[in-house]
Image (cartoon, rainbow, N blue to C red):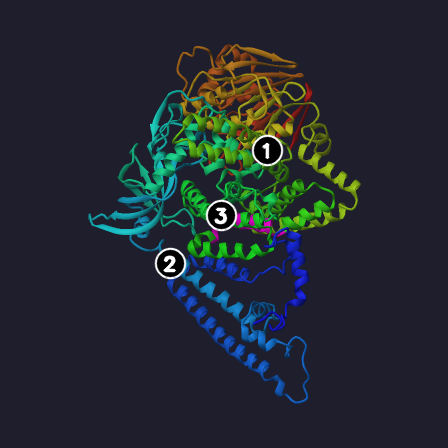
Amino acid sequence: MSTDARAPDPTADLAPARTAVHAASGSRLGASHPRQEGPTDLRLVPPALAAWATAALMLDASPVWTAGMAVACLAVAGVLLVVGRGGAREGHAGVSGREAVPGQGPVPGRDAVPGRDAVRGQGSAAGRFARAHRPARLTWPRTAVAAVLLCVAAAAVSAGLHGADLRRGPVPGLARQYATVTAEVEVSSDPRLSRPRVRGDHMGPTSVLFNAEVRRVEEADGTAVVTRAPVLVIVDGGREVSETVDEEPEVSETVNGASRPSGDRRSPWMELLPSTRLRVTARLAPALADGDRIAAVLRVRGPAVPEVVGEPSAAQRLAGRLRAGLREATDGLPADARALLPGLVVGDTSRITPELDEAFKETDLAHTLAVSGSNLTIILALLIGPPGMAQLVERRGIAPRLGISLRTTALLGGGLTLAFVIVCRPDPSVLRAAACGAVALLALATGRRRSLIPALATAVLLLVLYDPWLARSYGFLLSVLATGALLTLAPRWSAALRRRRVPPRWAEVLAAAAAAQALCAPVVAVLSARVSLVAVPCNLLAEFAIAPATVLGFAALATAPFAMPVAKVLAWCASWPTRWIADVARTGAALPGAGVDWPGSWTGAALLALATVVVLLAGRRLSRHPWWGGVCAVLLVLVVVQPPPLTRVVTGWPPPGWRFAMCDVGQGDATVLAAGEGTGVVVDAGPDPTLVDRCLRTLGITRIPLVVLTHFHADHVAGLPGVLRGREVGAIETTGHEEPPDQVEFVHREAAARRIPVTRAAAGEERRTGALSWQVLWPPPHPALAPDGPNDASVTLLVRSAGLRLLLLGDLEPPAQRALLRSPAGALLGGVDVLKVAHHGSAYQDPELIRRAAPRLALISCGADNPYGHPAPSTVAALRAQGAVVLRTDEDGALAVAGTGAELRVAGD
């Protein structure tokens, strides 16, 4: 057939527009552009959201409810599909027979047009184009509702099956009986350490935790039952040797095919790989909370070495070797880089100290310590090109430079993704990161951000059906929100910034950080009960270092098994951007106004979302008035930085001329003696680094000539990292009674990491700094009898400051208090102005000491609703009987004493 004889093309009038699109792209294949796309396709969003909600609700449902919901949804969906199909046939028949209607003229867009029959007969591309762009029929809502119901049914079935795993088999019943069993378990996650917690005056033991599945359990009668129940395994005392993350490595030893320093020794329990099978004797207990994805808690006591009955899989051994190689490659790096680089690359946070972890949480940088979609995005961008080239047909990655075809490039990308999942472990969080990271990369690499919403919805739908427990995961929610922000809000905000003459790269980065923060902040507030005011600037500053650190870290990971010297060089190069990220986190967290407390509930999240909308609307208006925008920016900086003079004027804290401050650190002690502008002597550090650091920041303390630790109980020394954080510290002075050993080791380790000398206090020692002087009254250098525990060895100080006399008793108990009265120092105790009451105001006080001291003001540091009943009513009554004004931190908050001699003033924070 000749060209002239062909049927007319109904799309001919579209040719100029389509030609223009192709010409603008610079390629015959054309290029996608957000402005040339149609409306966003949201058809998959309702099914994904419906499946998400159903999975979250049905995990705890009974089988009857699960089956009923699935059957009902399938029945209604089937009816809708059948009715919709019948309606479609009738509609088509009506269109076919409309010419027979008398008196009805042709309807534009619906009746015959020249050549239409020929087009239909050919089944040509033009015909397919016309049908694709035909106005939607009125039957589409039925199909959409049917699709939602089908997804709900699938999610209900999947959630029901996964939820049944928690109720199936003998494990749940044995857990309710707290039975001791011998079981065979398969490790399903990397072991991790519990976070140290202060319990009273001692630090709670650190345990090894990991998720596992019970595959076989022996009951009391000796019968073995094969089962499959997810459990949380807690190994008490499983960590025999602490990780010395701040010390340089010494000798190396081989573990899992890779050597590591002896200074980094870990318990054999920490070396377990996923898929390893163990035989354990443990006590079962019910799950810690309702809604957990575990059937029971398996608490193991005793063995220092696990009994392995099944080796891990080949893939997990390879992943373990790679991860161990990365750890070895980072040995010898500075402490922050040594801890952070494995976390940035493969999510290995075993070396992250609580102090550094807190800094990352305070600045909302904690997502960099977990495996996220950005890790995969960065690696795949090397293969197909940087996001900045998204709108060009020819990519500038490694693949086109090597002449690799598109299909081969896709296969290589899939291989990289699979390797990423294996090395970072196929945990649900890693699978979530792989799916959402691939979506984000595809959006950035193709420039079709709007059309990638269905891809994100598909990823959510498939992941929720695969693992319904993700529906209750805050991490999954944050990942989806962040990815959605990059696909929807970020492009619009970036375009708006470019219109205001912001450079394109800066506009893209700023828009991405702001959009992700706007959507994720309400959820983060639910988790932390705090809103970070420095999250966006800190993420912007860290953004430029994450990519090089990740790329170099993965290069070190890949080369470590074959060329360790090369891997060490690559790790050293990666340490520079890694240290920058750590410095950004520490600096941001150290700012006085880095964050504000916020209600940690969904009501608080709704309030924060409303506040975010208000701020965005106000910011949009302020962008038209640069001067007002500048004023608001300066005010925000002042709120975050909080210069001490301005803070003192606005809040009245600390009061002018303050001499002594008692920080509110809960059930513990932390006090400060003013020694000049920005300078203070700190006596005890309290139980929580964050609380004491916050107190010192509000007091404006940046230089500490001496830290006095009265004794080594955890409620007095566990907060030491917060005291040392970002401050110049001259020395640490402690008691000579070094008990308990673990806290003594902790103090010396913290001091050694910062090269701070540690000395011992002894009675008779006198010191002075500026107008502040003090004398050590207790303990004696050579006591006749060993102290009855650490409390009786507390360093006791008599302080003189601007005419005030202060007596700080530590945690002295009656035996030591009476010995102090009998000592030569007892003559100095009369008529003090301020008494720091011993041992949080407990009932164990010597009445004679209270009478001899006769304080005008008695201060007690204790936690609200503490289980010890501190302060004791008898102690408070005895102090008041001597004419003392009694104040306590659990009711009055932080306290500051000012004045000289006869004039004594007290202010509360």
Direction from residue 18 to residue 546 in the image, left or right: left
Q: Is residue 323 magenta?
A: no
* Disc 1: CA contacts within 10 A as few (<14), some (14-19) or many (>=20): many
Q: What residue does disc 2 label?
A: 161
Relative vertical location of residue 787 with respect to residue 716 in this rendering, above or below = above
Q: Which mark is residue 589?
A: 1
Locate residue 427, reporting x and y percent: 42, 46
Q: Amino acid at mark 2?
A: Leu
Above-or-below relation of 778 to 644: above
Residue type indicated by callout 1: Ala
The residue closer to the viewer here, 56 or 647, is 56
Q: Residue 842: percent from the left, percent from the top?
A: 49, 29
The residue closer to the viewer here, 18 or 219, is: 18
Q: Position of residue 534 (x, y in %)?
A: 63, 37
Say which element carries label 3. loop
The segment highlighted magenta reads 471-488
Instruction: Determine whether the residue tagged by mark 1 lies in a helix, strand or loop.
Output: helix
Q: CA distance from mark 3 to mark 2?
A: 43 Å
Residue 546 position within the rendered picture, expressed as x and y whole percent measured from the top left: 55, 36
